[in-house]
C-alpha cells in the first residue's frame, strides 16, 4: 500500500489571491508573512482580539466558500490536483490531505476539484504538527507541499517529500 498526503493551498489550487481577497472582503489586510500559517497563529494579534479574529475568520471562510462555489477553485487548479485525482483511483494507493486552513475551506476546495474530501485528515495544521499526522497515517509515504518547510516534518516521520514549487 502506497500512502500519499498533500497540502491543499498552493499544491492543488492557487488559492493565495482568493484567500487574500476573502480577508479583504471582511476588512482584513492579510500580511504576506501570514501565508501558510493557520489564522489563529497570526490573526488575533493583527486585530488585537481573539474573539474578533474568530468572527472575522468565520466571515472570511464564508466568503471563500462562496468564491469556490462560483468556480474559483477550478479556474485556479494546479497540476498536482490532476495527479492526485489519478492516484485516488489507483488500486493499492491511499491519498490524504492536510491544510493550514479551516475544515470548511479545505473540504470546499477538495469537493470543487472532485477529490475525496473524506480524506482530509488535518485542518488548521501548522508545519510542525504535520509530522504527527504522517506518523499516524503510515510508517512511510510521500508528502507534497508548496513550502520547502514541509520537508522537515515529512523526513522526520520517515516520509519522502515532493516540493511543489510554484512560480506565480
Image (tube, rainbow, N blue to C red):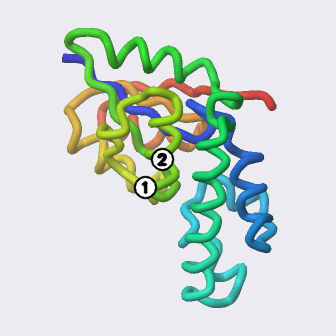
Nearest the camera: 147 or 155?
Answer: 147
Nearest the camera: 80 or 129?
Answer: 80
Q: Is residue 111 found left or right of 156 in the rendered image?
A: right
Residue 95 image point, x, y percent: 33, 27
Nearest the camera: 39 or 59?
Answer: 59
- Residue at 58%, 52% in the rendered image: 65
Residue 121 image point, x, y percent: 31, 46
From the image, tell me which residue sits under label 1: 103
Q: Is residue 1 visible?
A: yes
- Residue at 52%, 55% in the rendered image: 101
Considering the image in quadrants, where does the C terminus appear?
A: top right
> Helix, strand, or loop for circle 1?
helix
Residue 160 drawn above or below residue 150: above
Residue 160 drawn above or below residue 136: above
> Helix, strand, or loop for circle 2?
helix
Q: Are marks 1 and 2 in contact (CB under 8 Å)?
A: yes
Residue 28 image point, x, y percent: 77, 71
Nearest the camera: 65 or 15?
Answer: 65
- Residue at 20%, 32% in the rendered image: 139
Considering the image in quadrants, where does the N terminus appear?
A: top left
Which numbered disc covers residue 106? 2
Q: Is residue 125 visible?
A: no
Amino acid at each position: 500500500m502506497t500512502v500519499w498526503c498533500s497540502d491543499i493551498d498552493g499544491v492543488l489550487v492557487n488559492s493565495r489571491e482568493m484567500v487574500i481577497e476573502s480577508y479583504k472582503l471582511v476588512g482584513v489586510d492579510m500580511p504576506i508573512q501570514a501565508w501558510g500559517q493557520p489564522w489563529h497563529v497570526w490573526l488575533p494579534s493583527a486585530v488585537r482580539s481573539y474573539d474578533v479574529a474568530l468572527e472575522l475568520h468565520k466571515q472570511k471562510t464564508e466568503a471563500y466558500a462562496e468564491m469556490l462555489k462560483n468556480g474559483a477553485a477550478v479556474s485556479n487548479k494546479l497540476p498536482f490536483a490532476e495527479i492526485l485525482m489519478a492516484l485516488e483511483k489507483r488500486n493499492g494507493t491511499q491519498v490524504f490531505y492536510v491544510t493550514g486552513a479551516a475544515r470548511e475551506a479545505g473540504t470546499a476546495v477538495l469537493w470543487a476539484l472532485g477529490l475525496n474530501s473524506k480524506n482530509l485528515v488535518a485542518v488548521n495544521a501548522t508545519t510542525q504538527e504535520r509530522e504527527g499526522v504522517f506518523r499516524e497515517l503510515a510508517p512511510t509515504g510521500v508528502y507534497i507541499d508548496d513550502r520547502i518547510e514541509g520537508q522537515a516534518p515529512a523526513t522526520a516521520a520517515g516520509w519522502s517529500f515532493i516540493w511543489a514549487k510554484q512560480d506565480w
